[in-house]
Image (cartoon, helix red, strand yellow):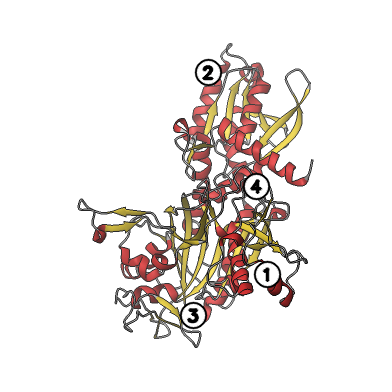
Amino acid sequence: MSAKEDRTALMEKIVALCKRRGFVFQDSEIYGGQNGFWDYGPLGTELKRNVRNAWWEDMVSRHDPLDAPTGAPSTYQMVGVETSIIMHPQVWKCSGHYDLFHDMMVDCKQCKARYRADHLQVRFGYTVSGQKPVVAFSFMDGSDETKWSTGKQAKLQKETTRRANDQSVPQESSPVSLPEYLHQIKELFQVSDVPDELLPSCPKSSCGGQLTEPREFNLMFKTIIGALGTDDDAAFLRPETAQGIFVNFKNVIDSNRVKLPLGICQIGKSFRNEITPRNFTFRSREFEQMEIEFFCAPGDSQQWYQYWRDRRFAWYQNLGISQANLQLRDHHKEELAHYSIGTADIEYRFPFLAEGEYGELEGVAHRGDFDLRSHMEGKLTTGPDGNLIVETNEHGQPKYRGSGKDLSYFDDQTRERFVPHVIEPSAGADRATLAFICEAYYEDEAPDDKGKMQTRTVMKFHPRLAPVKAAVFPLVKKDGQPEKAKEIYRELREAGLAVTYDEQAAIGKRYRRQDEAGTPWCITVDNDTLSDGTVTLRDRDSLEQVRLPSNEVTDEILRRMKS
């Protein structure tokens, strides 16, 4: 079995476990499901809530205000907000989303399948005898089989031969994205529109229909406010949580007597009408973000950018993700947004990707003063000198006017007024949850109740993230064991721990049920408990079993949670 097949099989096991144990379900499954939307079951709800709580505790409620980079102010503050999903439409116009937040899509004219153009790869070339071009294409992630398609005989045949020879076009190019292929074809033939015979066909092997040229597809979900339903009532579900923070920057500063450097944090739902949602919960149309907008003085921003890159990269490792499966990748210059001073992605080696490929978990961006200035002045673009300027229409007027509000900051220590720079660590709660699920999945061999070795499936969640922290079992359902087990169960719950009680089936099967759920510890009450007051504490990962007094169980679990 190839490495790709191994990874595909692993992902299939993970997805099957997620449904079987109640981590993730397909949305509206009884009606056939809805692509790009997912529901979390009981265990998944607890897991994702624990991911959110860990992020909030580490970034906001328990952050160390003295933990600042060398040379920066000795203290900083982190506060939270919760902003509306539907905002004033002008927010999205000034931020650039209204005009620029789109992907290029193509459709198959025959089967009506829809694809993101940049997810299709094309190899193309020309035969030396001057015959028609040969085109090959496949999805970038290799999820569909590669299909070769030969174009129809065309009047451009001689022109194809001449230009191919003149420009020394290789017989077969290295893979390029579909938009790049179409660009090269236009350059090669010096035409404004790609001839139909040079458009590749549908990658579905059972179809072969012709694809359309790429066109823009706005990713924002449109909705209506009020009863009239006119164009003036149009609004959008937010595609990101960041803008709610930017428009409330002044409110937070004025109402809370906080100073810069300052992080304003938010966890909330966002919506993007993805053309081709795929790879389980990795790319969805409804998702949850965990974002920080960190405001600081321009002169300190580069230090803070490095600080947040390192801190956020360490956060995933501290919660159990192996460094071997993580990477911190700086964006190339051509990847950066026109206003970005620097961006780095924290990426994870998801099993659904090809060997050696990584998928984005979180982006850490140095956004300069672009966002606050946009909401002050209007939509910004880059001028000839490389500086940001207000974008104008054909009449020389601002294309979209900003609020006109002063969003600058006055530093009463230095007596300076400036528009703060922003560092943005933006994480996906769903992607983080998926990464922790993939990282936790593990199989080994362990003896069953009869001593026979069997495959054991384990979810090795970090204890802070585990949906259930402990399970309590009576060995048998008699002799006072259930009563004692329920007493321990209630003590653990009163301590604020998520615990479960189970008295069904053999003890080995109960252990395995908890291993699949990711429960770190199991407590078993037996006959000795009633005589000497001790119970068995079993560790999920090491399988070590120790005896300890029943009245020490809660303290021991809490101690292990902190270690």
* Figure quadrant of residue 444: top right
Type of amino acid at the residue the image marks with label 1: Lys
- x, y percent for residue 553: 59, 32
Q: Secondary structure at mark 3?
A: helix
Q: CA distance from mark 4 to mark 3?
A: 47 Å
Q: Secondary structure at mark 4?
A: loop
Q: Residues within 10 Å of mark 3 (few under 14, many from 20)?
A: some
Q: Earlier in the sequence, mark 2 or mark 4?
A: 4
State the mark number for residue 408: none
Q: Earlier in the sequence, mark 2 or mark 3?
A: 3
Q: Earlier in the sequence, mark 4 or mark 3?
A: 4
- x, y percent for residue 264: 43, 64
Type of amino acid at the residue the image marks with label 4: Asp
Foreground: disc 1 or disc 3: 1
With 127 as the anchor, is 415 left or right in this view?
left
Q: CA distance from mark 4 to mark 1?
A: 33 Å
**Residue furthest toward the left?**
228
Q: Which residue is mark 2?
A: 483
Type of amino acid at the residue the image marks with label 2: Glu
Foreground: disc 2 or disc 3: 3
Q: Are marks 4 and 1 in contact (CB under 8 Å)?
A: no
Instruction: Please tell me which residue lies in front, 501 or 323.
Output: 323
Q: Which residue is mark 3?
A: 298
Q: Secondary structure at mark 1?
A: helix
Q: CA distance from mark 2 to mark 4?
A: 56 Å
